[in-house]
Image: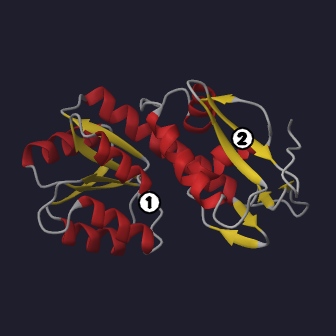
Amino acid sequence: MSDKVLIIEDEPTIARLVTYNLSQEGYETEVVGNGAEGLHTALHGEYAIIFLDLMLPGMNGFEVLQKLRQNGVKTPVIILTARNAEEEVVQGLKLGADDYITKPFGVAELLARTSAVLRRSRNEESKETGAPTDEKVIALGDLQIFPDKYEVYLNGQWITLRPKEFEVLLYLAERPGIVITRDDLMNVVWGFDYIGGQRTVDVHVSSLRKKLELNQQTVQIESIRGVGYKLMVNRRGGTSSAK
């Protein structure tokens, strides 16, 4: 059975380009030309991946994406954005997009990003199933991480993380006090075949940091200018266990 792809795009030329090339690779495609209809279709159908234009008539792509995630739709989303629209990309990633493609784009990039996103999504799904009974837990200060269940607790309270936020946190938590470069995070979490830039890492770390520091101060992600990040574990009273 072929993977079904939903394309929410109002520009006929772009929609045809995506549809034709994905169909040639064996994907089953469905095109919707506006945000409201696209949201309804995505909520009531099952798709392997969604391509979402941001500048849609009526309900724009940001609103569609936000409502999808609020309704618990975890289907991978690749946003389609205009050239030199970094703010749009950042906002889209913060709302839960998995990747982006800048218009105009080539066929090779389209197929490579589609394949990479689907592969990462399936790897995450496989990790979420069949967790062993003797589960692993990483405890750092007020933070508890359950790698086999993709769950994180702060002060005993479960917090919601996107899959990539969880993987970034896990990689840092397994190496407390050690500086991890952006390239390392990109390669480990997104894979060597990921085409996006390091800005993707920064956006996910920024979102993750806000969630972690909301109700506790024992675990913090520090930025190392020009290099990357490190996770610091502070004992009660302010002394760092990683120093």
**Residue under the image location 46 percent in, 39 percent down:** 200
Residue 37: % across, % down: 20, 71
Mark found first going from the N terminus, 1 or 2: 1
- The answer to whether 26 appears left or right of 227 in the picture is left
Is the N terminus in the top left, top right, bottom left or bottom right quadrant?
Answer: bottom left
- The answer to whether 206 appears left or right of 5 in the picture is right
Residue 96: % across, % down: 44, 57
**Residue under the image location 14 percent in, 43 percent down:** 14
Residue 9: % across, % down: 18, 54
Residue farthest along the front direction in this orientation = 237
The answer to which of 140 and 93 lies nearer the viewer is: 140
- The answer to whether 94 appears left or right of 229 in the picture is left
Q: CA distance from mark 1 to mark 2?
A: 24 Å
**Residue 126 visible, this orientation:** yes
* Residue holding disc 2: 171
Tell me the kind of residue under disc 1: Thr
Query: What secondary structure is marked by label 1?
Result: loop
The answer to which of 92 and 241 lies nearer the viewer is: 241
Q: Is residue 125 above or below residue 205?
A: below
User: Which of the two discs, 1 and 2, sits closer to the camera?
Assistant: 2
**Residue under the image location 60 percent in, 25 percent down:** 227
Residue 43 occupies which quadrant of the picture? bottom left
Tell me the kind of residue under disc 2: Tyr
**Residue 45 visible, this orientation:** no
Residue 40 occupies which quadrant of the picture? bottom left
Colour scheme of the rendered structure: secondary structure
Query: What secondary structure is marked by label 2?
Result: helix
The answer to which of 226 and 71 lies nearer the viewer is: 226
Mark drawn on residue 17? none
Mark drawn on residue 75? 1
